[in-house]
Amino acid sequence: MANEDDIPVLRRRVDDSDDVLVRYHRTIPDVTGDERVYARVADALSVMTASGARAEDDYRRLIRAVRRDDEFVAIVAKTAEATEEDAYEERWALTQLLVDLQNPVAADYLAGLVRRPVPEEKAEDPAHGLSTVTEEVILRTTAMEGLARLLRRGVDTAEVLLDSIAATDYVAMRRAAWFALVDGGADGAVERARALLADRGEEWIADIKRIPVEEAPQAEVESKGRRPREDAPSPFDE
């Protein structure tokens, strides 16, 4: 529904009094000119970013349905390439979708993103707000996860990751590239990466041990008399 100002109003239930006004929305570019194809990409992003009790299952079904659709994957990659540089949320969503699809057609886009130099900082005060450099690094480390998954599926993405370890200015990217090679199971490339890290004096990256979050040491917090909440409410759509 919409109010008198033509601003969409969303309700979670028919009888729910909590309204959310959507005052504006951003769109992804249409790279084909075909409304049906554009709708497929937009719908995929909607499923990917949805919330609710069934959101994860819906997304898994989507991935299974389109994973082998090379044409669709290529269009998602072209859409990501054509998206405005400062549309970080949209670029990340498109990139993560390509990562999850694990289709070799996405390899060129993911590799190109990783190889592309990180643009200079554009934020006026990145220390206290949005940092465009941080957003760009996040995009590239996300793409590296996709290259790792493709490497496990037999797509040779190791050289892109090795080049990142050798040349990138950002330790977060060197660390992500290292773990991508380890996760990709490329033993020869892992040894080359270890040597590159040693040349930089960053052997500590190769010594980092990853553990499941549930195994991480937890801080002891005094309750100060507050009782734990026992009966959390169910999600609204259950």
Image (spheres, rainbow, N blue to C red):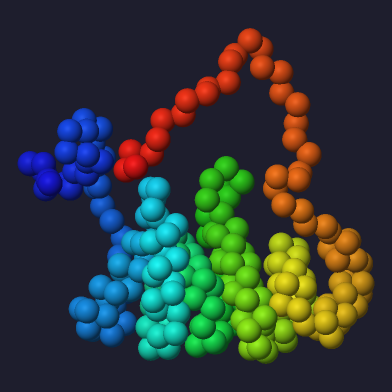
Question: Where residue 234 sits in the image (x, y, percent)?
Answer: 40, 35
Question: Where residue 141 sits in the image (x, y, percent)?
Answer: 63, 67
- The correct choice, above or below, for 45 with respect to 22 in the image is below
Q: Quadrant of residue 193?
A: bottom right
Question: Where residue 226 sits in the image (x, y, percent)?
Answer: 60, 14
Pick the residue in front: 75 or 61. Answer: 61
Q: Quadrant of residue 148?
A: bottom right
- The correct choice, above or below, for 231 with respect to 154 in the image is above
Question: Where residue 194 sits in the image (x, y, percent)?
Answer: 88, 75
Pick the residue in front: 93 or 84. Answer: 93
Tell me if I can see residue 76 in this picture. Answer: no
Does residue 227 appear to the left or right of 8 in the view shown? right
Residue drawn 44% across and 85% down?
68
- The correct choice, above or below, for 90 with respect to 220 in the image is below
Does residue 119 appear to the left or right of 201 in the view shown? left
How many tags in the picture?
0
Residue drawn 63% across and 70% down?
145
- The correct choice, above or below, for 80 with respect to 205 in the image is below
Residue furthest to the left in view is: 4
